[in-house]
Image (tube, rainbow, N blue to C red):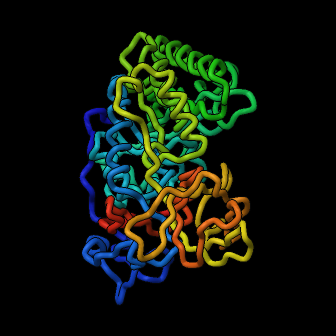
Amino acid sequence: MNAKRNVVEPSPATGTSQTVQSLTKGLGPLDRPTPLEDVARLVWRLLDEDVSLPTAVLYEDRLKHNLSWMQQFVSKYGAKFAPHGKTTMAPRLFLRQLEAGAWGITLATAAQTQAAYQHGIRRVLMANQLVGRENMRIVSRLLEDPSFEFVCLVDSGEHVEQLGRFFSSCDQRLNVLLEVGVEGGRTGIRNREQLNRLLEAQAQFREHVPLVGVELFEGVLSDEPAIRAFLDNAVEIASDLARAGHFDRKPIILTGAGSAWYDVVAETFANADLGQPHEVVLRPGCYLTHDVGAYREAQQRILSHSSVAQQMASGLVPALHVWAYVHSVPEKNRAIVGLGKRDAAFDSGLPVPALHYRPGQSKPVNAPKDWKLIRMMDQHAFLEFPEHADIRVGDMIAFDICHPCLTFDKWRYLLVMDSNFQVVDIVETFF
């Protein structure tokens, strides 16, 4: 991979949607298919009920803040940034991340890589194994473009042999990263025996499957001492491989970091001594919208422990809401809201009431802390509150989200709003 490329210029989105149609949820009135670029001119305002609820919205000022905050954090370690795009699968946001200084985009599958490429992304770190003939064909076709840079993971000799046979038959080079894993974890080598078997296979196909660095995902662990030991082991392996001359890239790539422990990864990898130049590539993805669940807890830990984070203004802020109407108030302490499992993630905690707005009022107010969702169905949520709370049918409630990844994939379009709740942009997803 060419280390000098940074921000990429978008290319024509061949074969992808360029217009918005009112055939999906969460939009305002559209008489005809409308170009994405023209949506802001339609003057939709959420508080004027110009949008069909439920709807998923992003706040422009908060997006800008999070983009800037994370890029500054990564830069202070002298590291590179390849945010994980599977969080949003929104190429419009990928390009904003690149414009803010990202080195590339991390993705998880060949199909995601193809969607990103069609929207102008020219450097992809696929934090996964490339397995299967059609998936290899997809990447092979993209590699025919000399401006496209791609790297994926390997963790077994068998996998290296499969890649080697395919890409040697195409006379192409597929850059790969050795993935290091842990017992009971996800993918990645567990021991030296597996590593040696991989290296033997890679030596046979080195011309077509060059090894360019080492990768891990520390998010399979939750204990900081275990994570630090995992990182140290990866550094030791990378150092051994560098001394033995196994890498075919300078600088060597050393990469990790989900959205919870990126500070620990940055600290360990930035201070690593491999005996050769290396570049650290960090990959958190949920930072862009943040949340009020596990990632908020992780951010609080980072802000309290990281001297780098403490030098920076504030921290990440939630930038994603799902808005919904109150449909029914059948009991004194319960309302039924038009928000369900088809609209918001529920795997890491139910959505949290954040704002309350009654059409006709001047502005939303903070939802009381004692309002709480207790259950979700496909299209309904059960909101519990103290008796005689001021809640009526037709009220609008904005919900904070506890897992952005599984909320984005429930929406084809997300609206971007300014501080006046005016729609200024629209983001299209490609899951």
The residue that appears at 66% across and 73% down in the rendered structure is 379
Work out which quarter of the rendered image holds the N terminus and state it.
top left
Tell me if 47 is positioned left or right of 215 in this view: left
In front of the other: 66 or 218: 66
On the image, the x and y values in percent for residue 281 come to 42, 31
Residue at the far bottom: name it.
Answer: 31
Residue 198 visible in the displayed image: yes
In front of the other: 365 or 224: 365
Q: In this view, does 58 lie above or below 84?
A: below
On the image, the x and y values in percent for residue 4 come to 25, 34
The residue that appears at 50% across and 40% down in the rendered structure is 152
In front of the other: 303 or 92: 303
On the image, the x and y values in percent for residue 406 come to 59, 56
Tell me if 247 is positioned left or right of 420 in this view: right
Quadrant of the rendered image containing residue 226: top right
On the image, the x and y values in percent for residue 402 come to 59, 50
Residue 167 visible in the displayed image: no
How many circles with numbers are drawn on the protein? 0
Quadrant of the rendered image containing residue 385: bottom right
Quadrant of the rendered image containing residue 115: bottom left
In front of the other: 271 or 345: 345
Tell me if 275 is positioned left or right of 96 in this view: right
The residue that appears at 57% across and 58% down in the rendered structure is 353
Q: Is residue 365 above or below residue 201?
A: below
